Amino acid sequence: MGAVRPALIDFQVIPATEDDCLTLAQVEAIAFDNSKKEPPGSNTFQIMFGSYSDVGNEFRRSNFLEKMKTDPTARFWKAVIKDENGLEKIIGWARWHYFTEPKTIEPLKNDIPWPTTANRDACNDFIGAVELAKKKHMDGKRFGFLQVLATLPEYCGKGVGSALLQQGLSTGRGLGLNDYWIDASADGHDLYAKFGFVDTEPVILDVEKYGGVGTICIMGMRKTE
């Protein structure tokens, strides 16, 4: 007997709004806090930002709101269903950036005001290394960049991530882009490979100096159409 495919669900992908920012932060934290392929001692999100907290959620809410208001390259989409009361429920979301002019990728600044729950050194070291890897391959290019894709654990495997990814790629094509970059976690890697992203530049961090166990890897993946 073949493997049983999970039942798909009825959802929509629509633009997220400023009023959604706190919920987006909460969904992101829940999704990354419950990684299926990273054990707790090697969970990238927990090592960098700590476990789910109001402080962390407020930090990300403010960041998302600022991006929506001030960054013309940013696009936020949410996947929504209707709950038992007929109200909208966000079950996943994605944040893309579209650089329609050649993009100069600057090194990460070390003065970012991370939340008090974060490990500042881990954040600066890891995100700085990820940015350098992206710069190596994408500096000076026109491209689309998937910054975040998060799905609530109970809705994984139901087509939500695929729909958010397809929405982002479709928008990029509409803007005349044919080059895309993703910093892929272990959980998202296979989905991105399914859509034609190719392993390009691994970023490996020894997390024991931050209180973690072993190493973690984020794979820079690229898709050129």
Image (cartoon, helix red, strand yellow):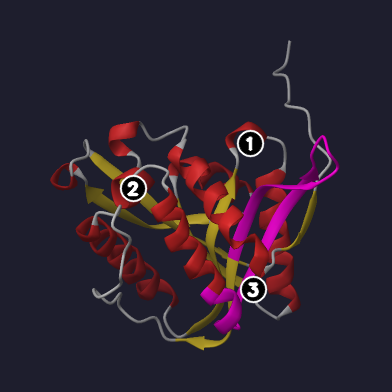
Where does the image place residue 142, in percent across and percent down from the top left? 55, 82
The 10 Å Cα crowd at callout 1, few under 14, some 14 to 19, many 20 or more, is some
Q: CA distance from mark 3 to mark 1?
A: 27 Å
Front-most of residues 132 and 224: 132
Q: Nearer the viewer, mark 2 or mark 1?
A: 1
104 lies left or right of 149: left
- Of callouts 2 and 3, the N-terminal one: 3
**Residue tagged 2:** 217
**Dot 2 lies on which element?**
strand
- Of callouts 3 and 1, the N-terminal one: 1
**Residue tagged 3:** 178
Residue 155 in magenta stretch? no
124 lies left or right of 77: left
Q: Amino acid at mark 2?
A: Cys
Where does the image place residue 210, in percent across and percent down from the top left? 18, 47
Q: Is residue 218 above or below residue 214?
A: below
Query: Which quadrant is the C terminus positioned in?
Result: bottom right
Q: Amino acid at mark 1?
A: Cys
**Dot 1 lies on which element?**
loop
For residue 179, the mark is none
Q: Is residue 132 above or below residue 118?
A: below
Q: Which residues are magenta?
A: 66-95
**Residue tagged 1:** 156
Q: Nearer the viewer, mark 3 or mark 1?
A: 1
23 lies left or right of 210: right
The 10 Å Cα crowd at callout 3, few under 14, some 14 to 19, many 20 or more, is some
